[in-house]
């Protein structure tokens, strides 16, 4: 994990490190599958098959795609941007009518090998056939109306959704991709042999602000300028000791945040993490 600005405080030692820089991460799915609403297919699992938003009302063939990424390595990062990329296929038609392809947040855990139109895993049914998912403020998290050619990438800006996941505002049960009548696109799944064709999520994290500290009258004063960063602390840099949000009082004045630490005894380690 990229570590934010950290400094060490002791009675006679004070050393501030430079600000952490933005970083770019690329993730492949840990699970993906499509579901199909057709007699004979509603209870069938398509875990290693193509992904799809195929929708033909004339035959009642509605297909949806579910994808999940493991983002634990960037937990509590401040997300600057997040882009989902899928590689389109036109074996069954295209999206020349430019139907919206919408991204929603899945509400319930599901398994790749148990997922069907009716079930979210091997034993539990969806609350609503076809999947339980929501948008944000009544709208999808992201939309594309692209009419792709074969093997052309399509992208969605999923920054808000990914930020909810990494800051644990919403549980990461993955995303659902749905479309409308007349869209016959399919997409490459994570099992394809060519890595460039697989789904991937690109996340760029924001750089953290400079983190300053100075001693005054036996106390230590820390200050920073970001309004979207949270102070964390611990007393040991061992990985076994978890960082925790500090409960110390933060004073805000003229765009600056400051915390005053009484004369420290022993070691204290502090860092900023991205909010909220």
Image (spheres, rainbow, N blue to C red):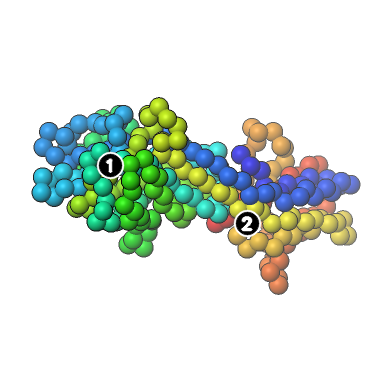
User: Percent x, y for residue 112?
Assistant: 33, 32
The residue singled out by tag 2 in the image is 229
- Residue 259 visible (yes or no): no
User: What residue lies at 55% left-to-right and 38% top-to-bottom?
Assistant: 73
How far is disc 2 from disc 1 in space, using C-alphas?
45 Å
Q: Nearer the viewer, residue 271 or 160?
A: 160
Q: Quadrant of residue 85?
A: top left
Q: From the top left corner, tell me how far across and down residue 36 is, in percent.
A: 20, 39
Q: Which mark is residue 90?
A: 1
- Compared across the picture, whether 58 is left or right of 79 comes to left
Q: Is residue 240 left or right of residue 118?
A: right
Name the residue nearer the viewer: 80 or 145: 145
Task: Say which mark, if any, is on residue 26.
Answer: none
Q: In the shown orientation, is residue 179 left or right of residue 24?
A: left
Res. 74 image quadrant = top right
Whether residue 38 can be seen here: yes
Q: Could you tell whether 247 is left or right of 88 in the image?
A: right
Mark 2 or 1 closer to N-term?
1
- Specify the quadrant that holds the C terminus: bottom right
Label 2: how many Cα within 10 Å (few below 14, some 14–19, many 20+) = some
CA neighbours of label 1 inside 10 A, class few (<14), some (14 to 19), many (20+): some
Identify which residue is drawn at 19% across, 53% down: 181
SS for callout 1: loop
| Image coordinates for residue 42, horizontal then vertical, percent | 17, 37
């Amino acid at each position: 994990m990229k570590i934010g600005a950290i400094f060490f405080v002791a009675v006679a030692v004070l050393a501030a490190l430079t600000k952490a820089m933005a970083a770019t991460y690329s993730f492949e799915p840990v699970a993906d599958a499509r579901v199909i609403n057709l007699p004979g297919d509603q209870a069938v699992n398509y875990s290693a098959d193509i992904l799809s938003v195929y929708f033909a009302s004339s035959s009642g063939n509605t297909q949806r795609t579910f994808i999940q990424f493991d983002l634990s390595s960037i937990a509590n990062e401040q997300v600057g941007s997040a882009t989902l990329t899928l590689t389109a296929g036109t074996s069954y038609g295209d999206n020349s009518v430019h139907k919206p392809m919408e991204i929603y947040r899945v509400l319930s855990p599901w398994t790749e090998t148990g997922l069907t139109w009716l079930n979210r895993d091997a034993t539990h049914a969806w609350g609503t056939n076809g999947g339980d998912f929501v948008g944000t403020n009544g709208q999808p998290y992201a939309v594309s109306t692209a009419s792709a050619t074969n093997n052309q990438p399509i992208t969605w800006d999923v920054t808000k959704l990914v930020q909810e996941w990494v800051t644990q505002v919403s549980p990461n049960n993955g995303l659902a991709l749905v479309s409308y009548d007349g869209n016959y696109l399919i997409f490459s799944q994570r099992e394809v042999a060519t890595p460039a064709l697989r789904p991937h999520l690109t996340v760029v994290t924001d750089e953290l602000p400079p983190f300053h500290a100075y001693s005054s009258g036996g106390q230590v004063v820390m200050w920073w300028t970001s309004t979207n960063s949270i102070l964390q602390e611990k007393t040991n840099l061992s990985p076994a000791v978890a960082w925790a949000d500090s409960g110390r009082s933060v004073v805000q004045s003229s765009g600056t945040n400051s915390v005053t630490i009484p004369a420290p005894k022993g070691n204290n380690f502090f860092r900023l993490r991205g909010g909220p």
